[in-house]
Amino acid sequence: LYPGSPAELQAHLGELLRAGLINPGSQANLSQFKHALIQQAAYLSQPRAQRRQTHARIAETLQQRFPARALHAPAQVAHHLSEAGQGAAAVPLWQSAGAHAQRISAYREAAQYYQRALDCLSDVPPGSQRDSQELALQLALGVVLNAADGYGAQRTVRAFERARELSERTSNIEERFGALVGIWAGTGSLGGHISAMELGREVMQAGEQSNN
């Protein structure tokens, strides 16, 4: 990633080492900042445009030179793409990271990844493709939040309510059924029996339409 020659890089690293800003790493040819605050200060001292370019180069390097690592650590690549201002490219990687965390029952971590994917959707142009992406993410978020916090948690209900809204917009019957089940369970757990009965009827109707 360094634009200069290896000799120039070593010279600069030597200056930082003598200044007490970095320490030798645990492996040869590796160095690390002496303290996280020093690293943060160095990072923030760069202009925003330069930071974005650096993140973009890191993401490109990971994907092109270390494809196996990028495949098994999609959140790392997604982070750099997000910081590079390439949110649309980061969405499927955050989603993949969320799905992996969900498979190993790391539900809160999965929720964080799904939320990062949703945040990056602001870079995707409005339209049916974006709605479909958000619908899948909101349903996945609702499922992991239910596992972490329960159906009655406000964040869980909000995710399923948003999924319901999107499913009606996209006319996706099967995913509307999943959203309704999530809302229905949340309403029932909160003691809204009348609303739960009304939603229950909607669930049954949607289930019949989707052959569930």
Image: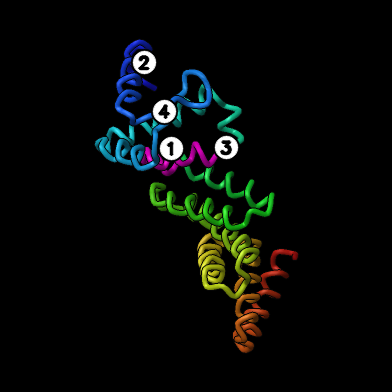
Q: Quadrant of residue 9?
A: top left
The residue lying at 57 percent from left, 37 percent from top is 73
Q: Residues within 10 Å of mark 3 (few under 14, many from 20)?
A: some
Residue 63: percent from the left, percent from the top?
A: 51, 28
Q: Which is more N-terminal, label 3 or label 4?
A: 4
Q: Quadrant of residue 207?
A: bottom right
Residue 111: percent from the left, percent from the top?
A: 55, 56
Q: Which is more N-terminal, label 2 or label 1?
A: 2
The residue lying at 53 percent from left, 70 percent from top is 161
Query: Does the residue at mark 1 contact the one at mark 2 (Cβ under 8 Å)?
Result: no
- As measured in the structure, the alpha-carbon distance from the residue carrying label 1 to the one carrying label 4 is 24 Å
Which disc is residue 80 wearing? Answer: 1
Which disc is residue 113 wearing? Answer: none
The residue lying at 56 percent from left, 68 percent from top is 156
What's the amino acid at mark 1? His
Q: Which is more N-terminal, label 4 or label 2?
A: 2
Magenta span: predominant SS is: helix
Q: Quadrant of residue 180?
A: bottom right
Q: Which residue is mark 2?
A: 10
Q: Which residue is mark 4?
A: 23
Q: Is residue 136 visible?
A: no
Specify whether residue 104 is painted magenta: no
- As measured in the structure, the alpha-carbon distance from the residue carrying label 4 to the one carrying label 3 is 26 Å
Q: Which residues are magenta?
A: 73-88
Q: Nearer the viewer, mark 1 or mark 2?
A: 2
Q: Nearer the viewer, mark 4 or mark 3?
A: 4
What's the amino acid at mark 4? Asn
Q: Which residue is mark 3?
A: 73
> In this rendering, is residue 122 above or below 31?
below
- As measured in the structure, the alpha-carbon distance from the residue carrying label 2 to the one carrying label 4 is 13 Å
- As measured in the structure, the alpha-carbon distance from the residue carrying label 1 to the one carrying label 2 is 25 Å
